[in-house]
Amino acid sequence: MQGRGRFNRGVLQYERLLPVLLFLVIPACSFLSDKDQAPRRGKVDASGIPDAVPKVEPKSKYGNMAFYEVFGKRYHVLDSSKGFKQKGIASWYGKKFHGKKTSSGEIYDMYAMTAAHKTLPLPTYLEVKNLKNGRKIVVRVNDRGPFHENRIVDLSHTAATKLGIIEKGTGLVEIRAINPGAYSRGGAPVYTSSRASKSKPPDFYIQVGAFSDSANAKKLKNKLAPLKQRVRISKTKVSGKTVFRVQIGPLNNIDVADDIVSRLTQLGVYEHRIALQ
């Protein structure tokens, strides 16, 4: 499946705690391994499984360190999810991790409406919107990952089924943190999964840099020539200042985007994100 950028629920290296160096071993979803699987019992009817119900919760005891490292890359955990929004590629994880501990210390249940994210506080409630079919779900983030280079969120098997990405394995999504106090009425969740509708998948770009100097943007664009892909420099205003963004695309195929991302490191380009039109 396209969510295979999974790491074998392995070792995360955590912040230095003085006066001793402390390393915590916490399972994290999505260490790079090849194959995850759907449930043995076959296709799951997710229609009767409700979305996660946002509620005010304390941060979990585990998984909320200031930062951690995976394969030499450092991830800084956010103090708050307030106002958080992100667009990119979602994947899912299933039977391989079912029944094992998540980074928060909870047990992963592929039939529950949960998800993994690299930097959001645990737990965080997210609205996830499939940008292809318009379907929305609400999940509870209780795990770390995905550590695939080109993914922003890993959904449980059931969550991915409800969102409509289970067959393909990935999908373009927008995620938005939910303030539990503002999204409940009389104890009932405001959000429920909306029905899918057929539409053309949105085009997207791989953004590899943003500069205040156009000369630096052109230099990076020229550096990307070996990719033999269309590269544009998008001029925009941010806080009143002109910014030149270097973007590869437009693209409409996640497999192609993954291939491009895998080749970026060979060109000495290590930072990138998905940008939609």
Image (cartoon, rainbow, N blue to C red):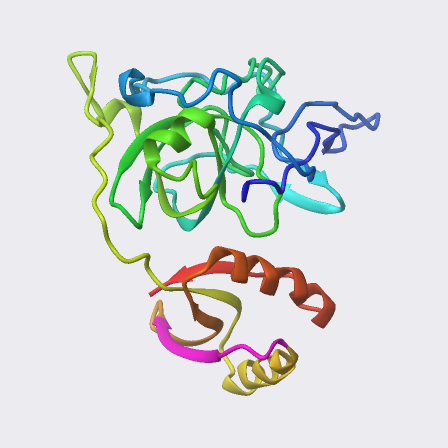
Nearest the viewer among 98 and 13 is 98
Rendered residue at 19%/25% (across/down)? 190
| Residues drawn in magenta | 227-237
Q: Quadrant of the C terminus?
A: bottom left
Question: Where residue 178 appears, x then y in whole percent?
Answer: 31, 32
Side of 235 relative to 37 (left or right): left
Rendered residue at 69%/40% (across/down)? 32
Nearest the viewer among 214 and 48 is 48
Magenta region, main secondary structure: strand
Q: Look at the image and tell me whether residue 125 can be seen.
A: no
In the depicted structure, whether residue 211 falls above or below residue 88: below
Side of 20 relative to 207 (left or right): right
Rendered residue at 41%/23% (across/down)? 43
Question: Where residue 80 appears, x then y in whole percent?
Answer: 44, 34
Side of 7 relative to 207 (left or right): right
Rendered residue at 67%/65% (across/down)? 263
Nearest the viewer among 59 and 274 is 274
